[in-house]
Image: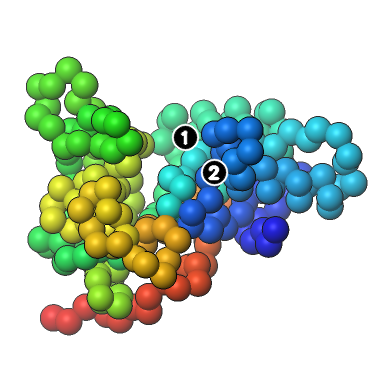
Amino acid sequence: MNLAILYEDNHLLAVNKPPGLLTQASGRDADSIEDQARQYVKRTCGKPGGVFLHAVHRLDAPTSGVVLLARTDKALGRLQQALRERRVGKIYHAVVARRPPADEGRLEHHLRHGDRHAQAIGPAHPEARLAILDYRVLGRAGEGWLVEVSIRTGRYHQIRAQLAAVGAPILGDTVYGAPPLPAYPGIWLHHRRMVVPHPTLRTPLTIEAPYPPGWPASSPPAD
């Protein structure tokens, strides 16, 4: 276990999740970043028994980047409330197969949670949920384009489905029509930065995660 710690105090633990690893275990034998972080706290704090440690949010298994965990029940409650009230900033970086239709803009779609995917549908559908994100193209990255994304809503597979809906699927995301990445264990979607109100200090805390190994180098876009 090689856990990449991004931030740590008595209330919070932030780690850099690698691609291909679950945020939370879905079965008895499934490994997860939450389980690895719990073992880390047990080892460093000398606690042989159970410890309180819960993920405040989740990333899809093929996605990498910042995962924030609460070390107390009070911290978990306050951070979950901040998420509900949209007082948490989340910035993602994605490498997409094709350049989006504009260098920056806002995408609005109505999504339906299907079987292991999200589908863009009409707003009148009874299962439709509005999804909003802002994006800007940062430049070329390997064979694709590096895009910065800020989400305004928190829908299932939102970034993956919305970028695919405008013809710019994330590289490696075969679920949404992109070519696979044979030498990479996930998709090129990375939770780059998170800004949260600290649960006890009540001041903004910014956490940033380096790219994982294998992430393509980027260059500014051409005019």
**Left or right: where does residue 204 sit relative to residue 124?**
right
Name the residue that disc number 2 marks.
23
- Which x, y percent locates residue 119? 20, 36
Q: Give the distance between the C-alpha atoms of the residues marked 2 and 1, in whole angstroms.
A: 17 Å
Is the C terminus in the top left, top right, bottom left or bottom right quadrant?
Answer: bottom left
10 Å neighbourhood of mark 2: few (<14), some, or many (≥20)? Answer: many
Q: Amino acid at mark 1?
A: Leu
Q: Is 8 in front, or is 37?
A: 37
Q: Amino acid at mark 2?
A: Thr
Q: Is residue 39 visible?
A: yes
Q: Going 58% across and 33% down the picture, which residue do you hit?
A: 27
The answer to whether the residues at label 2 and label 1 have Cβ atoms under 8 Å apart is no
Q: Is residue 105 left or right of residue 52?
A: left
- Vertical arrangement, residue 171 with respect to residue 21, above or below: below
Percent x, y of residue 44: 84, 52
Residue 204: x percent and y percent?
55, 49
Which residue appears at 41% of the width and 36% of the height? 86
Q: Nearer the viewer, residue 97 or 8?
A: 97
| Displayed quadrant of residue 190 | bottom left
Looking at marks 2 and 1 on the same chain, the residue that comes earlier in the sequence is marked by 2
Where residue 115 sits, quadrant-wise, is top left
**Closer to us: 144 or 106:** 144
In the displayed structure, 183 sits above or below 31; it is: below
Residue shown at the point (41%, 70%) measured from the top left: 183
Question: Would you identify the image quadrant in which residue 221 lies?
Answer: bottom left
Q: Secondary structure at mark 2?
A: loop
Give the class, few, some or many, for how many residues have Cα within 10 Å of label 1's Cα (few <14, many ≥20): some
Is 67 on the left or on the right of 11, as rendered? left
The residue pinned by badge 1 equals 83
